[in-house]
Amino acid sequence: MITRLRALWASINASYWFYPALFSILALVLAFGSVWADRAGHAEFLRDVKWLELARPQGASNMLTVMAGSMIGVASTVFSITIAAVAYASGNYGPRLLTNFMEDKGNQFSLATFIATFVFSLTVLGFVRTGEEQALFASVGNEAGIPGFVPQLSLLIAYVLMSLSVAVLVFFLNHIPASIRINTVLEGIGKRLIGHIQRNYPDKNTGRVEHQSPEGKAVCATGNGYIQIIDYEGLHSIADRVDGRIKLAVRTGAFVHSDMALAYWAGDNPPDDCGDEVRDCFALGGMRTPGQDIHFLIDELVEIGLRALSPGINDPFTAITAMHWLGAATSELGGRDLTRKFGGAENANNDRLVLLDDDFDHYVARGFGTLRSGTATSPAAASVELEVLYDISVTLDDESRHADLLREGDRLMEQAREHLAGPSLQELEAEHVVFSQKMRGG
C-alpha cells in the first residue's frame, strides 16, 4: 500500500491539476473566512488607516469583476504557453523529458496562483451589496441581504493577491524561456542525477564487492508496466521476518509483464504465502519515472547527446554539455560504494536483500557506452569524451574502475576508426595515445 501511495504521489507531482485545485480550495476557504471577518466587524480597524480609501459597492464590484476576468484570461494564456513550451522541449530534446517539465514547480505554482486569485475574487464578488438591494428570503432576515455591504478586508486581500499574481506573471515570463534553454535542461538533469546517486549510495568506495546471488523460488508479476518504485526496506523486512533471502530479478525502470519474475526466494524453507507481500513492494505504471530510477536520468542525458549528434541536427556542442554532466555523475558514482544496504546501521552486513549487480562498469556502459555510437562520428565530441573519461579517472583511486574508463576510451577509438578518416582520425589517434599513456600512468 505504501509503495502504491508513493507512486500515486509521484504521478500527482507531475500533474498540472493538483496545485491549482489545492490553491482553489484554499482561496475559497480564505474568501468565506475574510467575508465572515468583515461581517463580524473584525475589519473595522481599516477605518483608522488614513492612507487607505475604503471602496463603495459599485467600485468594489467593478474592481473584483476586472480582477476575476483578467486572472482567468491570464491563467488561460499561461496554460497555453506552458503546453507550447513543453511540446517544444519534448519534441526537440526527447519525449522522456516531458516528465521533467510536468514536475516543474514554477509552472505549477504560477498557474495555481492565477486560478486561486480568480476563485477568490469571484467568490467575494458575490457578497458585494448596493444600498438598494434587499434580502432574497424574508426568513433569512437582514444578514443575507445586507444593504450597502462591502467586504473591505476581503477586497484588500483580493488586491494583495492581484499584486502577487502580477509578480508571479513577471517570474513566469522569465522562467519559461529559461527552462527550455538546453544548458538549463542539462543542468537540471545532471544535478538531479548526482543527488540521486548521493542518496542511493551514501558510502564511499571500499573496493569491488561480488554478490552471491541466491537461486530459489520465483515471485512473478501479475500485471504489466514499468517498475516505478520498489520498497527496498519492505522487502528486507519480509526476508528478515521469514529468515530468508530475496534476490531481485529486476531494477527500477524495467518493464515487466505477467508471469515475469520480480524476485527469487532463497533459503531452507521458502515461504508459500509471502508472494503477495513481495508484489506489493513493487509499484507498476505506464511510464518510467525518475523517482528511484538512476538509469532513467542517465538515459535522458544520453538521449539528448545522441539527438544532438544525429545527422539531421549535427550539434556537437549540446552533446558535449550533456557529456560533461554525464561525466560529473559518473565521477560521483566512481567514488561511492555501489552496494546498497538495508535494515539500518546495525544490519549493515546483512544480506537478506540482494539487488542486481550494478557495478561501476555497468554505469559507464549505460552512459558513455550508449553514447559512443554518436560520439564516434564527431571528432569534437570524441575528443571531449576522452578528456571527460580522463577527468573522471583523476578523482578515483580504484584501479579496477580506472580500467573500466580506459576500456571505454579504447572502445570509442575502435568505433571512431570506422567513421572518421583523414586528419580528423589522425588527430584523434594522437589524443587517444596521450589518453592511454596518462591513464596507465605513463
Image: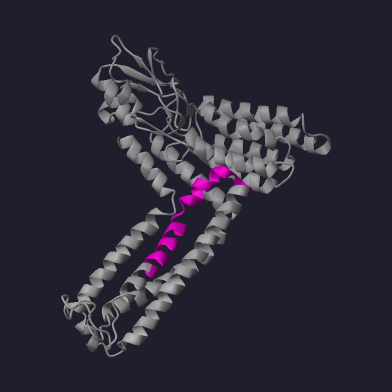
Q: Is residue 77 left or right of residue 264?
A: right
Start-end of magenta stretch: 92-118
Where residue 353 sits: x, y (%)? 35, 23
Q: From the image, which quarter does the C terminus lie in?
A: top right
Say whether residue 106 is magenta: yes
Count the labels in the image: 0
At x 40% / y 12%, what residue is drawn? Answer: 215
| Magenta stretch holds residue 308 | no
The residue sitting at 34% across, 37% down in the picture is 4
Q: Residue at x 37, y 42 (%)?
A: 8
Which residue sits furthest right? 422
34 lies above or below 401? below
Q: Position of residue 347 (x, y in %)?
A: 27, 26
Task: Measuring from the top left, give residue 57's x and y in whole percent.
Answer: 31, 86
Task: Quadrant for residue 41, please give it.
Answer: bottom left
Decide: is 348 above or below 107: above
Relative to residue 189, is residue 377 drawn left or right?
right
Evaluate whether residue 22 shows in this view. yes
Name the residue at the front extreme.
Answer: 138
Please name the residue shown 42% across and 18% down the image: 211
> For residue 159, what is the image quadrant?
bottom left
Outermost residue, top direction? 268
Out of 83 and 410, give the one closest to the viewer. Answer: 83
Image coords of residue 157 (percent x, y)? 31, 75
